[in-house]
Image (cartoon, rainbow, N blue to C red):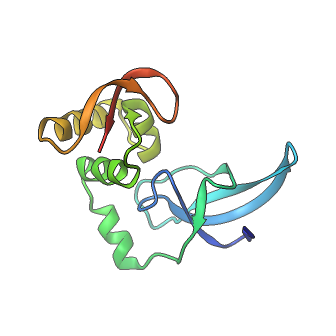
């Protein structure tokens, strides 16, 4: 895959909300890594960070209407979209919080618990697909 500086990409972990551009590249441990910079029109900003090939995919620049729709989502809606986009992987509350850049751990916990209570998600003991910890996890 040929990824160019300035190219629009979406992070595979949260493809509807983490869209931005490649700002820079460098070689690290004989592998190319890419500096991801989130589109500044999104309200929940993720700081720039180095991503590996396979963490993202090319995409088109999102429209202003799309960005407005994403910015209007509630926390439970963001959690639901995240879990559905990453089905069947299971996530702990901390990794949901980090992926969605939520301000408080309780936001992820309450949204995941509420979704499980309504039958939208499955919640229980398991292994988080990101951090690998054996804790309470949620999946769609």
Quadrant of the image for the C terminus?
A: top left
Give the left or right position of residue 57, taking residue 101 as reference: right
Position of residue 7 relative to residue 29, above or below, is below
Quadrant of the image for the N terminus?
A: bottom right
Residue 4 image-quadrant placement: bottom right
Residue found 61% across the figure and 53% down from its top = 55
50 or 129, nearer to the observer: 129
Position of residue 94 relative to residue 54, above or below, is above
How far across and down, in percent of the image, does residue 15 sit? 46, 60
Give the left or right position of residue 121, taking residue 34 as reference: left
Residue furthest to the front: 88
Position of residue 59 relative to residue 27, above or below, is below
Position of residue 125 relative to residue 68, above or below, is above
Residue found 52% across the figure and 50% down from its top = 46
Q: How many marks?
A: 0
Residue furthest to the left: 118
How far across and down, in percent of the image, does residue 64 sit? 39, 78
Residue found 29% across the figure and 30% down from its top = 106
Residue found 37% across the figure and 45% down from its top = 88
79 or 72, nearer to the observer: 79
How far across and down, in percent of the image, does residue 34 sit? 72, 56
How far across and down, in percent of the image, does residue 92 sit? 39, 30
Residue 25 image-quadrant placement: bottom right
């Amino acid at each position: 895959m040929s990824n160019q500086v300035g190219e629009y990409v979406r992070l595979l972990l949260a493809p509807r909300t983490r869209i931005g551009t490649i700002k820079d590249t460098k070689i690290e441990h004989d592998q190319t890594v890419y500096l991801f910079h989130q589109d500044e029109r999104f309200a929940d900003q993720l700081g720039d960070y180095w991503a590996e090939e396979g963490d993202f995919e090319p995409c088109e620049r999102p429209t202003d209407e799309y960005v407005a729709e994403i910015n209007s989502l509630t926390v439970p809606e963001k959690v639901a979209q995240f879990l559905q986009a990453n089905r069947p992987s299971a996530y702990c509350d901390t990794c949901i919080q980090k992926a969605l850049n939520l301000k408080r751990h309780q936001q992820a916990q309450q949204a995941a618990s509420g979704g499980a209570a309504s039958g939208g998600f499955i919640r229980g003991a398991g292994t988080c697909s990101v951090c690998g910890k054996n804790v309470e996890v949620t999946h769609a």
